[in-house]
Amino acid sequence: MPESRPPIILITCDELRADALGCYGNRVIKTPNLDALAAGGTRFQRAYTNSPWCLPSRCSLATGLYPHRNGSYSNFRDIPLDPDMPNIYSLLRGAGYHSAHIGKCHYKPVPYEQTRPDATLPYDEFRDYYLSLGIDHLALQDDKQVSVWFMDDYARELDAAGYLGAYRDATWDRSRAKVFAFPGPAEWHPDSWVGMKAADYVAEYRGDQPLFLWASFSGPHYPFDAPAEYYDSVDMSVDARFHDASEFDDPSRIHAAAFHGRPTGAIDGLGAAPGGATKHFSEAYWRELRRNYFANVAQIDAYIGRILTEVERRFGQDVLVIFTADHGEMLGNHGLWGKNNCAYEDVWKVPLIVKYPGEGQARVSDALTMLVDLLPTCLDAAGLGHDFCDGLPLREREATGGAACVFAEGEGFLAVSDGRHKLTRVAQAERRHAELIDLEADPHELVNRIDDPACQAESARLSAQLLDHLMSHSLK
């Protein structure tokens, strides 16, 4: 174990598209703080989540294991992360780190059936469970909607300040379809709260142990609820939503049912869609949704700037900083919002910026990487082994030329991509879908080529990759 183990600062967003950041080409907003982090570190161009759902993705990041390996593969089934399974908190704490988490955890399925519009319910059981994973300090804001459904740490403070009732009413108001301005002062928005708590914790940390801090923002996940004062930071004149309705003339497409309003459709935005079909959302609705999303990203970037300022002031350059997201967001592209069952690049690809201790030069990596690579990266920095992980430390991943394929999993969902071709399979109740996309010939992912005779070799090769992926662990 190295004599000097660097502090490790992991910053994540929920449902953040890679192309929402300036350093990834966005021009609708400015993200100067994350752009500056990229200017002094490594920006990964082809980083992918291991699940298009929050809980499985976060559990994979925390354990370095694919969802089918850690057992937490669903947002909805009662299969929380096992506290006895080694994870990022317990492993780093065992190596002498002080482990802190501020913001969203979501390692245990939310009891959606208990939620009610007139009350925010107790949440102590969840908080105690999260602490059992090895967290020394927890300031819990467990998702924007969760904080109006259940009394986490943020909800308690918001209630004491007098703003919880208005936030709960706005979140439950179906007429707003999950799009509204935060109904309170901007400093009381959940992402402001997480940013301030994290920055203050770094500034005040005086422990003898090296610090591991995970600052986990709930935004820009829906509801699309940025404080109105951030609207002016968004230049909608350069925004462009991609959509070609003819894509869903093909009933084999996974989201054709949701777009047209058939009962088997499954995407987050479907519940808010007029007439139960996402094709009925108006252009005015999409414009407001996208403005709020980008305004929320600008807000988060400002608070990440506060965190990074305190990190540099407290630790200098001898620190490992990792920034990423659990998955992306469709954001109206393809006429959809949300992420459920999505293997579109909009959702599968995530931002990933890493600043190693002492690093100061910008690098860009095209290596295929996955979120299961992040725990091994942290363990490597702490001088710990990582042989049990499905991922590799990012430097080792780059040195080997990147992953041959990336994988995404979830309940009744599997996807594999080699960076050009991707195969997605869905088997959920009566739903059965198989999609093959050629990203080089079809970068907007409009044509399912699963039955194209010219693509049968690619389909067979990727199917074999999926089988090997599962069998190497499940039937060894």
Image: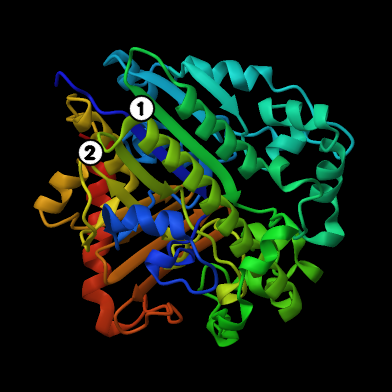
Q: How far across and how far down the image is residue 175, in percent?
A: 86, 61
- Of 402 and 357, nearer the camera is 357
User: Could you tell me if residue 107 is visible in this image?
Assistant: no
Judged from the image, the secondary structure of the residue bearing numbered disc 2 is loop
**Circles 2 and 1: CB atoms closer than 8 Å:** no
Does 389 appear above or below 433?
above
- According to the picture, the residue beneath numbered tag 2 turns out to be 357
Does 208 appear above or below 234?
above
Residue 94, image quadrant = top left
Q: Specify how the rendered protein is coloured.
A: rainbow
- According to the picture, the residue beneath numbered tag 1 turns out to be 88
Does 347 appear above or below 25?
above
Viewer-side label of 2, 1: 2
Q: Amino acid at mark 1?
A: Ile
Disc 2 or 1, which lies upstream in sequence?
A: 1
Is 172 on the left or on the right of 130, as rendered?
Answer: right
**Residue at the (29%, 80%) spot, across then down:** 440
**Residue at the (62%, 66%) spot, across then down:** 233
